[in-house]
Amino acid sequence: MHLRSLALAALVGWNAVAPALAQAPSVEHDALLYLDSQVLPKKAAACSARISGFSARFEPAFRAWLGANRSRIASGEAFLRADAAKTQTPLERDVESIVGSISKQWNAAPLPELQENCDTLLTQLREGPDGE
């Protein structure tokens, strides 16, 4: 699974991809966790800009999630860096593109949709990527 496929999965979100990837931990799943570690703060920024008090709920949940997934995030980053080296494509540029695209979507969302997305984001952080 290459970065573009993982990017699509990141755009879709945990709900759609977690059941398929949660069957057995894999380096591809770890790569999704790495992408989430880059994307989630941007999603949270969109939430915080329009939803009062969101940041105070997001920050502790995100820190706990990062701590619980630190080694898997590092594994996913290593996998994506190795894949990027094979294709001679800078990982940072691709990740910035993915993050920028998702950030635009969240910033442009109507408030009711954004509220639902932000609530789901918090729930997923608390439950973990595998619905634990």
Image (spheres, rainbow, N blue to C red):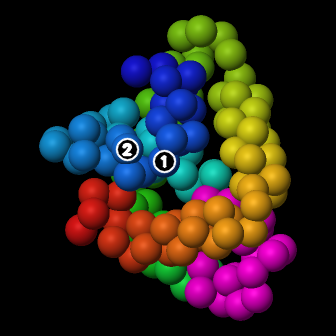
Q: Quadrant of residue 7?
A: top right
Overall secondary structure of the magenta section: helix
Left or right position of 119 against 123: right
Q: Which mark is residue 13?
A: 1
Q: Could you tell me which secondary element the residue under label 1 belongs to?
A: loop
Where 91 falls versus 89 (above or below)? below
Q: For mark 2, give the secondary structure.
A: helix
Residue 52 belongs to the span the image colors magenta: yes
Q: Is residue 116 visible?
A: yes
Identified at 63% across, 52% down, the residue is 38
Residue bearing the label numbered 2: 16
| Membership of 103 in magenta stretch | no
The quarter of the displayed image where residue 31 is located:
top left
Q: Residue at x 66, y 89 (%)?
A: 56
Q: Amino acid at mark 1?
A: Gly
Report the quarter where the C terminus lies: bottom left
Mark 2 and mark 1 residues within 8 Å of each other at the beta carbon? yes
The residue stretch that appears in magenta: 40-58
| Residue 104 horizontal/vertical position (percent) | 80, 47
Quadrant of the drawing holding the N terminus: top left
- Residue 65 position (above or below residue 81): below
Asked if residue 43 is positioned above or below residue 111 in the image, the reply reads: above
